[in-house]
Image (cartoon, rainbow, N blue to C red):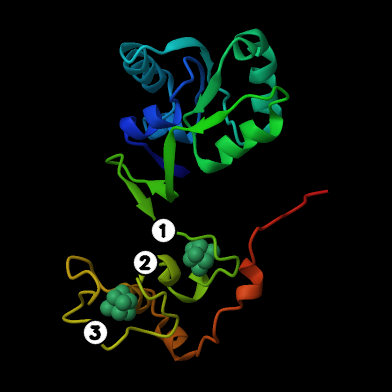
Amino acid sequence: MIITKQKEFKEVLRYLDNQNKIFIIGCGECSTTCKTGGEADIKRIKAILEEHGKSITGYCIPKAPCVAAQVKLELAKNRKAIESSDAILVLACGLGIQSVKENLRIDKPIHVGCDTLFMGAVDSAGIFLEKCSACGDCVLELTGLICPITRCPKSLLNGPCGGQDKGKCEVDKTRDCTWILIYNELKRQNRLHLLKERRPPKDHSKSTRPHQLSLQ
Ligand code: SF4
Ligand code: SF4
């Protein structure tokens, strides 16, 4: 899931300066879960914008605005309202915002309503946790399924740095050192021999940006 947070409202208002009729686009997947782009969030933003003298021409919530077919469908259904607007405000992640830009066939300013933070897992308490950085060359098989790229602040591949202290990370002492967690997990799995394998420097050619993958 892509984790987003609402931009500071005064920042959004600044973007919308001199544009009074606004159409809002949300997201039915990740941003709904993050409470940034679902129906309730849109209604909350709509009410605040109206208090500041803006008029909301309408809104839509594509199931996943990052999927071209889904955003195109909603844009087509709302064409008239969009045409009558001065601008569009997108409450979705950076993928959704860019997808709106690429699929909107009408020349309107598009504004950003959310900050995109990270790719996160959602635990049973509803807390979003960053556990993978999409590095393109996964090492979880060797690390007890604990990601050192994301969870070690130095992204170390061959064991802890000299700074770990009693199992805590030197960068953030409130957190366990990821490599101590990896050690304990491999020990539990009786696979400590994996730590003796030296991992070569990461092959960054596998994570050259921007990524592209075709299934055709
Ligand atoms: S090593 Fe970590 S960052 Fe890379 S793909 Fe695996 S989980 Fe993701
Ligand atoms: S203490 Fe552990 S988690 Fe922290 S930077 Fe060093 S190796 Fe990484």
Quick one: label 2, few (<14), some, or many (20+) residues within 10 Å?
Answer: some
Q: Position of residue 178 (x, y in %)?
A: 32, 72
Residue topped by disc 3: 163
Whether residue 216 is visible to the viewer of this picture, yes or no, is yes
Nearest to the observer: residue 76 or residue 112: 112
- Looking at the rendered structure, the secondary structure element under dot 2 is helix
Residue topped by disc 2: 151
Ligand 2 contact, mark 2 (Cβ < 8 Å): yes
Inter-mark Cα distance, 2 to 3 = 15 Å
> Seen from this angle, which residue lies furthest front?
18
Foreground: disc 3 or disc 1: 3
- Looking at the rendered structure, the secondary structure element under dot 3 is loop
Mark on residue 131?
Answer: 1
Ligand 2 contact, mark 3 (Cβ < 8 Å): yes
Mark on residue 119?
Answer: none
Q: Amino acid at mark 2?
A: Arg
Q: Are marks 2 and 1 in contact (CB under 8 Å)?
A: yes
Quick one: label 3, few (<14), some, or many (20+) residues within 10 Å?
Answer: few
